[in-house]
Image: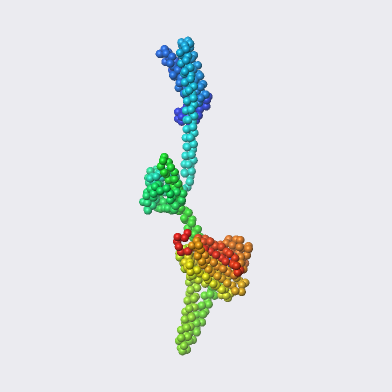
Amino acid sequence: MKLLRRIQDLAENGIAHPWKAGETILLSVLVLCLGIVVGLVLDIETGRHESNVFLIPAIVLAAGLGGFVPGLVLTGLAFIFDATADYFMTGFEARLFWTNVAFAVTGVIMSGGGHLFRQAIINAAKVNLEIRRREADLRAIVDTVPDSLVMIDHEGIIARFSPGAQKQFGWDAEEVVGQNVSMLMPSPYREQHPDFLKREIDTQASSVLGRPRLLAGLHKDGTTFPIEVSVGELEFAGERHFVGFIRDLTERQKAEARMHELQNELFHVSRLSALGQLASALAHEINQPLSAIANYIAGAKKLAAKGNDPALLDEVLDHAGKEAIRAGETIRKLRSFLSRGESEMRPENLAELVDEATTIALVGSRPRKVRLKTGLSPLCPIANVDKVQIQQVLINLIRNAIEATGERQTPRLLIETAPTQSGMILCSVTDNGTGLTPEVAGQLFQPFVTSKKTGMGVGLSITRSIVEAHGGHIWTEPNPDGGTIFRFTVRGPDPAIP
Ligand code: ADP
């Protein structure tokens, strides 16, 4: 039964699964017996002794299947049978004896040849198996990666379209294999791609290999979606092929937009809370011009009643008007600062931005007579920033600085800007306060780090988030005259600067 199964396997797979010597000899002996029977019948029919030709298949089979030793065994058996048969049919005859010896030598040579043939087949089968295993591995990987894999030939014709790609683009593999890859791209990429591919093949220095590129993909239903494509190259049958790994960025972009939204929300809430803390000082700040206006108007009324000094009346009304403008300005600055607004980077005038921020930051500090100096470099008047957010940074830093100078007779604050060599703008807020305490200094920009009894410790962590969202950095340095310098960078207006 086992032998039958092995014979069936031999018929189906060749000698992909090597035969053992025992199995081989058994099968070959059966074939030998068959050869003997056929040979004998023919010898009897023709009266000649040429039957040994029918023994050859058994020797070939033994050597081919089992190698040298089974080949030799079969050669020996065939030789014994042949010599014995000749002896019984004609007695000893030297010619026949030497024919049998020649047959045996041929059998030995055939065994050697069969052995080599068998070895070659087994090696080929091993290589074949390894190739099939690797292909299965590769297929498993390609089938399981969520990204798409699309392989194209040098003319852009799709040769392979992974299950991930089928899911992403909505096409079945049979629908796209053999078509030009530009069918997966919206205009204008679709029209440009053939020329692009041609250039890519003609030039040595590739512009796409190994560099992920952000593009748009075209779904079967006609919708487009953002993708990141990384292209690799392989040579196959003397022709260049390209493999594209395509990642759908829709989800990532959604998550990034959501993060951005949350961050803006956080910045906004933190502005609200900062102003909440300033509420009474703010009310006072606005109340002041309002009371001044009331006083000026009362005075003006009296002057008007007397009617004898129109020039003075004019001056008083002028003052009232200026106070009204001052109150209006403060409210305007506050309003834009409190607005939620979409975060938007655009070129902003730094002098205006700093002026508005200091107005709000200094609210309530007038009695302390903080001496504020600004030194804005004329070399960098414009920054590419979200104005309200950078004002929030400045307000956080200035308020902290004012608090740190609490015990100073003459609290001093300096706000400066300067261009950096890398094309950024360096902004500094310097105070002559207490300096950073060692406990706080080590983890300054971490949330909930505070040395103040009523402090929340979130101001600087939000400040850092804002600066980094602007592509800048923030750090501190001790002020050589006592106190602290907070420095941060923002981008200049030149869009070429990353
Ligand atoms: P909060 O002001 O609520 O404490 P911040 O994050 O704004 O939160 O500040 C964290 C801590 O950093 C402060 O408690 C303070 O100890 C320290 N700090 C910030 N700015 C200065 C400064 N200009 N001088 C000295 N210490 C400072």
Residue displayed at 50% across by 16% down: 80
110 in relation to 348, above or below: above
Q: Height in image: 271 above or below 65? A: below
Q: Residue at x 46, y 86 (%)?
A: 311
Q: On the rendering, which quadrant does ligand 1 occupy?
A: bottom right
In the image, what residue occupies the spot 61% across and 61% down? 442
Image coordinates of residue 156 in percent, x first then y, are 39, 46
The residue sitting at the left extreme is 191
| Nearer-the-camera pick, 206 or 118 | 206
How is this picture coloured?
A: rainbow
In the picture as drawn, the residue positioned furthest to the right comes out as 438
At 47% from the left edge and 18% from the top edge, which residue is drawn? 102
User: Which of these two is toward me, 58 or 340?
Assistant: 58
In this view, the residue in front, 47 or 226, is 47
- Report x, y in % for residue 417: 51, 67
Residue 22 position within the rendered picture, expressed as x and y whole percent measured from the top left = 53, 24
Residue 148 drawn above or below residue 295: above
